[in-house]
Image (cartoon, grey):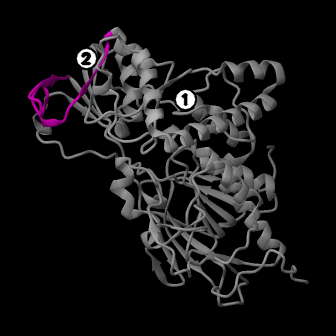
Amino acid sequence: MKKRGNKNLSEGNGTHFDVLIIGAGLAGIGAACEIQSQMPGKSFALLESRESMGGTWDFFKYPGLRSDTDMQTLGYRFRPWTEDAAIADGASILKYIKETAQDNGIDRHIHCSHRAVKADWSSDDAKWTVTATKGKGDDTATFTCGFLYVCSGYYRYDKGYLPDFEGTPRFRGQIVHPHEWPEDLDYSGKKVVVVGSGATAVTLVPAMASTASHVTMLQRSPSYVLALPGKDPIANSLRRLAGNRVSHFLTRWKNILLAVGVYQLSRRRPGFTRRLVRAGVKRLLPEDYEVDTHFNPNYEPWDQRLCIVPDGDLFRSLRKGTSSIVTDRINTFTEKGVELESGAELEADLIVTATGFDLLAFGGIEFNVDGEDIAVPETFSYKGLMLSGMPNFAYTIGYPSVPFTLKADLVAQYVCRLLKFMDERGLDICVPRNDDPSVVDAPLLDIQSGYAKRSEHLLPKAGSKEPWRPDRNYLRDLIIFRHRPISDPAMRFAKKAEPALSETALSPDSPKPTS
């Protein structure tokens, strides 16, 4: 994609935009690129709560930060990933996002240090009025838009999840959560205990083990851990033979089909997948290692996300003895470390609580439609990208089983199709309505991870049938989002002068209005 479209924000094009994007991370930058490319006449802006773009990859500072999947699929469809490393470090991913924004002129449309806190919809005007706080003070700014597009993800960034551990004030060392990692933290030569067994923990342990005296991963229960090559030899060979774009396309589809295949195999033959993962782990550990104690989860594959370790770095540190795993529960913190339910005590100079995060629906924005507050948990998710009763609104939440950007990319394409559909027919308003009494509530995130269960009550509902049941299969979504008709019985369209949004949806074959 190339630079084109809107004027620089500093040129005074006002605070009304055709599309207002919330969030300037991986999804927000991708959405802006898609809108600019597909609809060059549309004005748009991005509101970013932090001081710079990049989202997750600008926020986290802990050691070893990296992608948990390959960059050919986590990266953008339209911008090839050209580095040799397929599983990339955080700094490289942040650079990739920033270069994408700069090369396409998206950086000129970003309002940093603007946190959207309230969004009010007016059907009379067919527009949203968005209130944002500026910086850390009490100043606010107001923006209006015809379409509101939330790409803020679903993590709560201001603080991580921390269980109520008994005795933490007694501990004489330092306690750090990955959400609040001090950039000057020196752990060289120290005994470190990392509490947790998820993606963050398996990233931290080998990264810290290279300089710490010893790192112990203390887990309440095991996770599935899968070792993958840090570099993709097929991708790198294709790049040399066929160039960046062809190799990116071929490698991306290779990895998409592989990821979908692994997920389907896991759901249909969980026992076989469990044995397969266990065999891979056992191969990378000493013969007498207690694999079933530390790497045999009490749930089926893909009930929670699989943890990826590039080049088996976690297993390498376990073999070297620079790290170890203890599977037990914390009874209490002590002056020297933690006392476990088994009675053993782990001594530590530094305890890292990699205990996860909480979810925050749509950045915590308060929504109001025509004077009525919207309770997000009472809404239904339409096709996994819009909400019932919320006009001219879309959001991005990724799949549990394949890289986040795949869903973000499809949503951006769908939004452009939707806006073109409305423009061609002279329509101003679109809103999904759930009028089917047979639709049964279901969780939006169909995974058993702690963060999903803790925050389930804060998220919209999914439904038991289409279009309220989000499809978790990327290949099916590809057809739905790119090729299925925009109009269906659940989607209502109207012009500003038409007050009733509950009438029959416009057929995709309806004639376009004549001037």
Q: Residues within 10 Å of mark 2 (few under 14, many from 20)?
A: some
Image location (x, y in percent) of residue 10: 69, 55
Viewer-proximal residue, 190 or 258? 258
* Residue 137 circle label: none
Q: Is residue 253 positioned above or below 105 on the image?
A: above
Residue at the disc numbered 2: 190
Instruction: Tell me the element at label 2.
Output: loop
Residue at position x 42%, y 69% in the image: 377
Q: Amino acid at mark 2?
A: Lys
Residue 421 visible somewhere in the drawing = yes
Magenta region: 321-348
**Position of 148 relative to 478 (above/below):** below
Q: Residues within 10 Å of mark 1 (few under 14, many from 20)?
A: few
Please say if 389 is above or below 478: below
Q: Earlier in the sequence, mark 1 or mark 2?
A: 1
For the point 70% across and 62% down, the residue is 415
For label 1, the SS is: helix
Q: Residue at x 51, y 18 (%)?
A: 311
Is 330 a magenta residue? yes
- Image location of residue 251, percent across then percent down: 71, 30
| The N terminus lies in quadrant | top right
Q: Residue at x 47, y 19 (%)?
A: 312
Badge 1 vs badge 2, beta-carbon distance below 8 Å: no
Residue carrying label 1: 91
Q: Answer with the quarter of the image where residue 304 lies.
A: top left
Can you give x and y, in whole percent of width and height, for residue 135 in the image? 46, 54
Quadrant occupied by the C terminus: bottom right
